[in-house]
Image: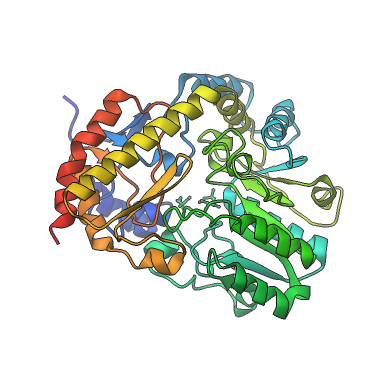
Amino acid sequence: MAQVIDTDQLFARAKEIIPGGVSSPVRAFGSVGGTPVFVGEAHGAQVFDVNGVGYVDLVCSWGPALLGHAHPGVVEAVREAAKRGLSFGAPTRAEVELAELIRGRVPMAQQVRFVSTGTEATMTAIRLARGATGRDKIVKFAGCYHGHSDALLAAAGSGVATQGLPGSAGVTAAAAADTIVVEYNDAEALARVFKEAGEQIACVITESVPANMGVVPPAEGFNAELRRLTREHGALLIVDEVLTGFRVGPGGWLGIEEGTDPDLVTFGKVVGGGMPLAALAGRAEIMQLLAPVGPVYQAGTLSGNPLATAAGIATLTLADADVYAHVDRVSAEVQAAVTDALTAASVPHVVQAAGNLFSVFFRDEPVRNYEDAKAQDTDAFRRFFHAMLDQHVSLPPSAFEAWFLSSAHDEAALARIVDALPRAARAAAEG
Ligand SMILES: Cc1ncc(COP(=O)(O)O)c(C=O)c1O
Ligand SMILES: N[C@H](C=O)CCC(=O)O
């Protein structure tokens, strides 16, 4: 019989050699406490810990696993690609095919540049906007997360929100000075910023639907107003679809909400099918400013990696209308079950959704911005989270993260989630 691995000991060992024991802060269970699940493998709707214990997974690798874990079609594509070589540092046909698949789903993506992470995609988009406009300042929204480049860490969501940090040490005052932070869903505040500094602003960057302070849908017309204001002042609009792209629908949020029409868009997560791949795309005349054609430099030894592009092509090819219909349905069912359980236990809560993307706030008022998101009972979330985990349902370990479903979440997975909810709701109520 295999020896049982003591994960508390493994976590202690990890912390000795890796800061916080993790390769990305959100994994560390910092705000919920306890020992993270050390994953040994993952298949379909489940992750299995190093001792083989299965958990229904509502993290889905923080979004990429739209088809569930280790989908045979994706794994086979990667296996076949691996036989031909792991990295070439040269152009490939697969990059062209994946770029064409992206443009087929998102027509404004006239040209595409591949990178390895969402952070690189947004960082490059900002540089490109500055290069295109000759302006220095950028505007971001409080609670939005666009990865961990210096300029974008101010008032950021995700792990920065979870840890309650205003930003990050190590970012120079100069780097931060060019970032203007505006409250989300406040178009009037943005208009004031443009009135005061419009000629210096290179771009506004926004998550198409913020999902890194919990899910905060844009108020009706908000994204269109961003388009109007940026256009009026000669600034670019960058829509970050790293999290929503190819997840909330075949064309991402841009395919659902009309009228945004950004200059640049960023993709990550689903587009790489679980492999390190992300992309920056947009209007050809702006993309043509990228090196080697234009003067804005961007590069990457592993950019457009053949295994990652193979996984991306397989994922986008397999993600058909049935997949999106299924994810929409199971997402709606989980949202309804969570609402029922928390209501029955008299736990103040609000479930917010944009398409199949949703999160649960432990407060009873709607959340329109980061200030609202922070005013929730994170302790109730902590109790809820652990009661779900004890029943082998794995939620994102933070009250500020979205929950993710996949086409592999079948009736059996749903039943396990629904069965676990009443006890977790009672635990949340027991303040
Ligand atoms: C909206 C958004 N943009 C950018 C990023 C950064 O992507 P990555 O973690 O791949 O650097 C993330 C997630 O991490 C994200 O959710
Ligand atoms: N919220 C982040 C991505 O969307 C979580 C992923 C990470 O930073 O590790």
- Quarter the C terminus occupies: bottom left
Report which quarter residue 108 is drawn in: top right
Measuring 16% from the left and 50% from the top, which residue is drawn there? 345
Rendering coords of residue 319 (x, y %) = 54, 26
Q: Could you tell me residue 84's position as x and y percent? A: 64, 21
**Depicted 79 relative to depicted 108: above or below:** above
Residue for point 70% across, 55% down:
125
> Which quarter of the figure is the N terminus placed in?
top left
Depth order, front residue of 271/416: 416
Residue 170 in sight here: yes
- Work out whether 175 lies above or below 264: below
Seen from the viewer's position, the closer of residues 11 and 401 is 401
Residue 208 vertical position relative to residue 419 in the rendered view, above or below: below
- Whether residue 5 appears in this view of the structure is no
Q: Position of residue 261 (x, y in %)?
A: 71, 49
Vertically, is 234 above or below 94? below
